[in-house]
Image: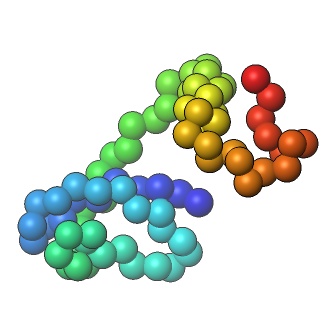
Amino acid sequence: MPIHDYKCRDCGAQFEVIVLGTDVPVCATCGSAKLTQLLSALAPAGKSATFIKNARKVAARQGLFSHYKRSERPRS
């Protein structure tokens, strides 16, 4: 699912939104469909594994994996 960055031409708000198929995104602030698609920054090469590992540590500390079975929990 692609995540796109947009800027609203009516209110100037910038936001990210997941766009599915032929869905037309609207501004999260004012509801306008007058949007300009912005260039999104790419994830740095080789950093995603470290980012995922750190995010999972934070999620585990916050108890967000408590509803997972033991076999489904991330290994540290």
Look at the image and name its color scheme: rainbow
- Residue 25 position (above or below residue 51): below
- Residue 20 position (above or below residue 13): below
| Side of 10 where 41 appears, left or right | right
Q: In what quadrant of the picture does the N terminus appear? A: bottom right
Residue at the image position 47 percent from the left and 63 percent from the top: 18
Residue at the image position 61 percent from the left and 22 percent from the top: 50
| Side of 5 where 52 appears, left or right | right
**Front in this rendered view, residue 61 or 73:** 61
Measured from the top left, where is residue 9 in percent x and y? 13, 67
Residue at the image position 71 percent from the left and 48 percent from the top: 66
Measured from the top left, where is residue 73 in percent x and y? 79, 40
- Residue 30 position (above or below residue 3): below
Q: In what quadrant of the picture does the C terminus appear? A: top right
- Residue 37 position (above or below residue 33): above
Residue at the image position 25 percent from the left and 71 percent from the top: 27
Q: Can residue 55 be seen in this view?
A: no
Q: Is residue 37 visible?
A: yes
